[in-house]
Image (cartoon, helix red, strand yellow):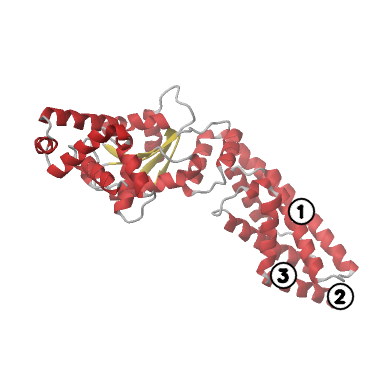
Amino acid sequence: MTSQPVAAREHVRQEMVADPRVVAAIVSAVHEQVPVYAALDDSRLPEVRAIAAWGLERLLHLWVTDGALEPSDLRRLRGIAAARAADGRPVQAVLRAYRVAATVLTDEIAARAPRLAAADAFALTRMLLTALDTLSEEMTTAYAATDEDLAADRDRALRLLLDDLIAGRHASVGALSDRSARLGVQLPDPYCLLVAEPMGAERPDMALDAATGLLEALAVPGDEGVSSATVRGSRAVLLLPGAAAARAGVVLGARSWRGCAITGESLDRVAVAHRLAADALDTAPAHAHRPGRVLTDADAHVLALLGGHPAAAPDQVARLVLGPLTDPGQRHLMEALTAYIDAGSASAAARVLHLHAQSLRYRLRRIHALTSRDPRDPWQRLTLDIARTIRP
């Protein structure tokens, strides 16, 4: 190759690498033309941009030097393919994304060098065809190997899926359904995300066996959806059918554990559910944990509100805590709750409302039955007080 063609190609390469619009054009085209990528949320797009920037730089370098993909390139491509197999993105869609990127690359070069020499054009075509053929073979092989490994170890595959959900590495409920189908499982929907830990001052990192043991203790034949468990530091994180929340307190109490069970978030918001539960365990006072009871969505949202970083609007927090008490037909129970909290005792509240003390106590029992919150319990009384205060 003479120095003049090299100089011309190098000029184009430098101009394209320095222009952030080229990577933006590649990402935009992939996002628009490949449906799986169109469904990606904002948390995944930086990864797509990083891969696009790396691919742009490498392909342009190969064009300038008449080079070939190196072993380090192939290792990176295999790693990308393995990651896509783990997060359930179909290999066909991944390879199509690279073909779309190659088309954009060609168009961008043509726009900058409209009178490209025949030798340069042939070199570009040869390089792209060779690179696409090589990466297709390498990525397909790596994808298939990872896919087989995941299918062979379903427990590990479910744990990886739960890890991805907790970290927010997912595209949509549809993408989760596709990944679950490939694993031959159905995620519980509605679900309960339980974050639990042993009680005590010192809590070393939890062994996975302890988390899976808790999972087995909570499992009930006939529950819909496949449960899974993983660990985060000293805590077990379990994805369970929604009905498991009702028995979590008893199981944890028998083990001297405490926990927080979130049931009100959708499958595409498992990361939000985990953050709520983990923050609740970090901030809840000791008296919030009672034998046979776990913290719930309502407790977690109240604690987030008290911490100054609410994950829900005040009226939603009030509805979570008060439940049916917000119905107009339960006004007498709201009046009893308000009087009891303000007066400090059932007898004093009864006098304020001109009721017999037994009638007031009956209403407090009804409040407990409807909200699962006992106004006589200090922590639960606080959550009820906060909810009735912030209620519109």
Amino acid type at circle 2 is Thr
Q: Is residue 162 above or below residue 18?
A: above
Compared across the picture, whether 114 is left or right of 42 comes to right
Q: Nearer the viewer, residue 127 or 88?
A: 88
Q: Residues within 10 Å of mark 1 (few under 14, many from 20)?
A: some
Image quadrant in which you'd find residue 200: top left
Q: Is residue 157 above or below residue 64?
A: above
Label number found at residue 2: 2
Whole-number angstrom distance, CA of label 2 to CA of label 1: 26 Å
- SS at badge 2: loop
Q: Residue furthest top?
A: 222
Which residue is label 3 attached to?
Answer: 16
Q: Is residue 236 visible?
A: yes
Compared across the picture, whether 354 is left or right of 230 comes to left
x 65%, y 68%: residue: 20
Amino acid type at circle 1 is Leu
Q: Quadrant of the N terminus?
A: bottom right
Which residue is label 1 attached to?
Answer: 132
Question: Percent x, y for residue 322?
Answer: 30, 38
x 34%, y 40%: residue: 320
